[in-house]
Image: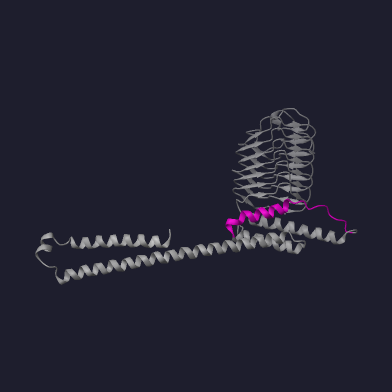
């Protein structure tokens, strides 16, 4: 509201209140008293005091309105100035990420992370830029003998990527000083060739995508991670050489999907993991990796292995507890790999869709098949 209109309305309202107060004071005298005698000095003084008080009140209200208006204008100016400063910091940091020198890019990474901590309204935008950098293909490592300078620069650029991963995972820890919990993160198609530590991270909401990511080296740890909400996707991800660990991870109320993922090499461990929510391995291909669910707990929720193909490698459920979750293996293909349920700890609610006699599939003795030797 314009300040002139606010003042006019304030004076009118205060004036109306003054008239009401004077009328209230006069009402203390009867009509006969007012007609037959003059008001005494005391009465006149009381009316004057009320009038002066009303006038002072009107002035005070006007002063408050003016002061409030000034405060609002000042706050709006500060907000605009702060937004301008944040945008300038963002532009500078984003520009540094495109610099030809790795050291400048590294400075830009730290600047963007610091800005994400300070600027809650722009945090997602800063995270989007960092994730976009990771999605860009790094290219092939130049030969050190024929192109030593390019070789050194490529390795330095790898340190920039490693720093981004460290900053992101640090902000997802349960005890992070400035947490980024609940933010959306898109790692679609990233190439992971070195170690990344997501241990003790929490995912309470948001969408985190590793779709078509390639895990070909290093060790990626999700140990004791908590997937308690949101959507985590590993759609068509390729596990061909990394050691990926979900040891003691908890899949409670969120959704974690490995739909169409390819496990062709390396090792993926869900040892001690607890599945209480929804997780899907539908259409996944187990052709060469060693995938273990040792001591995993399937106590609630729904887990899908429907349409999965077990054609190589080994998938072991030693010590696993199937006592509550609905685990589905409908349309799963067992043709060459080894899948062992022979040493489960609890089979009170067994998975559905498992065939009774298939080479490579070892079920508990109670189901009629005898366990064979370990692979």
| Residue at x-position 27% and y-position 69% | 52
Q: Which residues are magenta?
A: 119-144
Q: Nearer the viewer, residue 152 or 173?
A: 152
Residue 236 in the image: above or below residue 34: above
Percent coordinates x, y for residue 18 in the rendering: 27, 63
Q: Can residue 177 be seen from the camera position used here?
A: no
Q: Is residue 326 magenta?
A: no
Quarter of the figure with residue 370: top right
Please identify the quadrant where the N terminus is shown.
bottom left
Q: Residue at x 74, y 57 (%)?
A: 162
Q: Would residue 358 be visible to someone looking at this image?
A: yes
Majority secondary structure of magenta residues? helix
Residue nearer the viewer, 350 or 148: 148
Q: Is residue 127 magenta?
A: yes
- Estimate the x, y position of residue 273 in percent, counting from the top left: 66, 44
Q: In this image, 372 relative to 18: left or right? A: right
Near-viewer residue (18 or 183)? 18
Q: Nearer the viewer, residue 279 or 325?
A: 279
Q: Is residue 131 above or below residue 152?
A: above
**Quadrant (top left/top right/bottom left/bottom right) for the C terminus:** top right
The answer to whether residue 75 is left or right of residue 32 is: right
Q: Residue at x 76, y 35 (%)?
A: 310
Number of numbered markers: 0
Picture residue at 81% right of the left edge, 52% below the top = 139
Horizontal and vertical percent for residue 323?
62, 36
Report the colour scheme. one colour
Extreme-left residue of the structure: 36
Residue 115 in picture, x, y percent from top left: 63, 61
Above/below status of 73 relative to 324: below
Above/below status of 301 relative to 7: above
């Amino acid at each position: 509201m314009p300040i002139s209109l606010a003042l006019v309305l304030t004076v009118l309202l205060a004036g109306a209140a003054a008239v009401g107060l004077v009328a209230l004071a006069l009402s203390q005298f009867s009509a006969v008293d007012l007609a037959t005698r003059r008001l005494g000095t005391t009465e006149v003084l009381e009316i004057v005091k009320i009038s002066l008080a009303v006038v002072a009140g009107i002035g005070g209200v006007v002063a408050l309105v003016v002061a409030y208006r000034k405060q609002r204008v000042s706050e709006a100016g500060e907000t605009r100035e702060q937004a301008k400063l944040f945008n300038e910091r963002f532009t500078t940091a984003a520009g540094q990420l495109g610099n030809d020198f790795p050291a400048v890019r590294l400075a830009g990474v730290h600047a963007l992370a610091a800005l994400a901590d300070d600027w809650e309204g722009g945090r997602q935008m800063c995270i989007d830029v960092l994730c976009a950098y990771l999605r860009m293909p790094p290219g092939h490592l130049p030969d050190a003998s024929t192109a030593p300078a390019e070789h050194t620069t490529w390795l330095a650029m790898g340190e920039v990527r490693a720093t981004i991963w460290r900053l992101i995972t640090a902000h997802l820890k349960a005890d992070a000083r400035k947490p980024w919990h609940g933010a959306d993160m898109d790692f679609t198609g990233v190439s992971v060739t070195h170690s990344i530590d997501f241990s003790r991270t929490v995912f309470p909401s948001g969408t985190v995508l590793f779709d078509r990511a390639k895990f070909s080296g290093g060790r990626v740890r999700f140990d004791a991670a908590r997937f308690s909400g949101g959507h985590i996707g590993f759609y068509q991800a390729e596990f061909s050489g990394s050691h990926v660990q979900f040891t003691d991870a908890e899949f409670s109320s969120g959704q974690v999907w490995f739909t169409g993922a390819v496990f062709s090499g390396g090792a993926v461990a869900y040892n001690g993991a607890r599945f209480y929510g929804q997780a899907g391995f539908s259409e996944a291909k187990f052709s060469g990796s060693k995938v273990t669910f040792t001591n995993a707990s399937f106590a609630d929720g729904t887990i899908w292995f429907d349409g999965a193909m077990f054609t190589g490698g080994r998938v072991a459920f030693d010590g696993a507890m199937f006592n509550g979750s609905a685990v589905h293996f409908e349309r799963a293909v067992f043709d060459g790999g080894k899948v062992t349920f022979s040493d489960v700890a609890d089979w009170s609610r067994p998975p559905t869709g498992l065939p009774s006699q298939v080479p490579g599939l070892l079920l508990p003795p109670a189901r009629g098949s005898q366990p064979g030797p370990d692979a």
